[in-house]
Amino acid sequence: MFKTIIVSAFGAGLVVAATLSVVQSVTTEPLLFHAETFEGAEAPAPAAAPHEHANGEAHAHDAAPAEAAAAPAHEHDPDEWSPADGFERTAYTFLANLLMGVAVSAILLGMMTLRGGAINGRTGVLWGVAGFFAAALLPSLGLTPELPGTPAAELEARQLWWLATAAASAIGIALIVFSQSWLLKVAGLVIGVLPHLVGAPVPPSLEAAYPAVLAAEFATASLVVSALLWAGSGVAAGWLYQRLSRAA
Amino acid sequence: MTRSATTSISAGNTQASAQARLVPALFAIGFGLFLFIGTGFAAPSLIHNATHDTRHSLGLPCH
C-alpha cells in the first residue's frame, strides 16, 4: 500500500510539475523577473514611479552599485550560489515543482488512506481542492503571495504563521466536513478562523519599488498556480493510485 | 449465535484493515510533509535559491 502511494505520488508529481512549469512560464515567472528589475532600487521613489516599465529597468541598473548599502534585509547575498538565469534557473524551478507535486500527492493520498473509502480521480480532486483552501487560499488572506522586493515581517514569524494557519485550516475543514456533531462543526469553524483573529505578522511598510498592479497580478497568478498544484495532484494521484492498486 | 460470530469477525476485519492502513498512511503523510517543508520552507540559502521561484509562485513566505 505504501509503495503504491509513493509510486502514484511520483507519477502525479511529474505530471503536475510539467503543468506548473508551463503555466508559471507565462504567468508568475514574467512577473517575478519584472519585479526583480526593481530589486535593490530604493523603494519609495516617487520621482521614478510615473516612468514605468522601460525606465524602471534603467533605474534598477543605475541603482545597482549602491545595492550593498541600500539593500533591504531580504536582499540576496551575491556571494551565495544561485542558479544562473535561463536554463539552469528553469531546471531548478522544475525540480522544486516536482518535489512539491510529489509532496502534495503523498500528503493527499496519505490523508485519503487514513480516512478510508474510495481513492480515485474524483475523490482525489475533492481532497485536492480542500488542500488548496487549507494550504494556499486561507493563508493568502493574511500573507498575500509576494513578489521579490516586497517589504515583509521577519521570515521565521511569517513561516510559523503560514504553517500554523495551514494546519488550523486543515483541521477546521476536516471537522466541518467529516464530523457528525454540529458542536464539532462549529469548533472546526472557530479553529479555521482563529489564525486570522490572531493576525499575520505585519510588514514594516507598504511601499514597494515595483508598480502596484504587478503585485495584484502576481497574487492572482500565484493562487491559480497553487490551485493547479493541489487540484492537479489530487486528481492525478487519485487516478494513478486507483489504476495501480487495481493492477496489484 | 452464527450471526453474532460473523458480526464479530467482520468487525475484527474492519479494525484490522484500519490498523493496516494506519502505518502506510502516516508514513505517506510524514514523507509528504518532509518534502513540502524541505522544498518550501528550509532555511539554508542554497535550498532557498534553488527553490526561490517555486516558493514565490506558490505564495509561500520567502526571503
Image: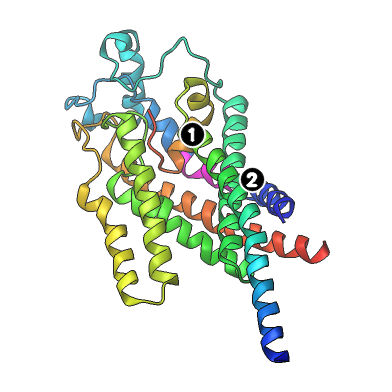
Q: Is residue A59 left or right of residue B30?
A: left
Front one among A14 and A56:
A14
Real-space Cα separation, disc 1 to disc 2, in angstroms: 15 Å
Q: Quadrant of the N terminus of chain A?
A: bottom right
Q: Position of residue A232 (x, y in %)?
A: 58, 56
Instruction: Please tell me whether the stretch drawn in magenta is mainly helix, strand or loop.
Output: helix
Q: Which mark is residue A157?
A: none
Image quadrant of residue A146?
top left
Q: Position of residue A155 (x, y in %)?
A: 33, 30
Residue at 44% of width from left, 12% of height from top? A78
Q: Residue furthest right?
A: A247
Q: Chain of mark 1?
A: B
Q: Is residue A223 left or right of residue A216?
A: right
Image quadrant of residue A183?
bottom left
Image quadrant of residue A148?
top left
Q: Quadrant of the C terminus of chain A?
A: bottom right
Q: Amino acid at mark 2?
A: Ala
Q: Is residue A10 left or right of residue A143?
A: right
Q: Residue furthest front?
A: B1
Q: Is residue A120 visible?
A: no
The residue to which callout 1 is attached is B53
Q: Label 1: state its secondary structure.
A: helix
Q: Position of residue A137 (x, y in %)?
A: 38, 54
Residue at 59% of width from left, 30% of height from top? A92
Q: Amino acid at mark 1?
A: Asp
Front one among A84 and A241:
A241
Indicate yes or no whether the magenta region holds residue A181.
no
Q: Is residue B31 visible?
A: yes
Front one among A44 and A178:
A178
Residue at 37% of width from left, 36% of height from top? B61
Residue range corresponding to the magenta coloring: A17-28
The residue to which callout 2 is attached is A18
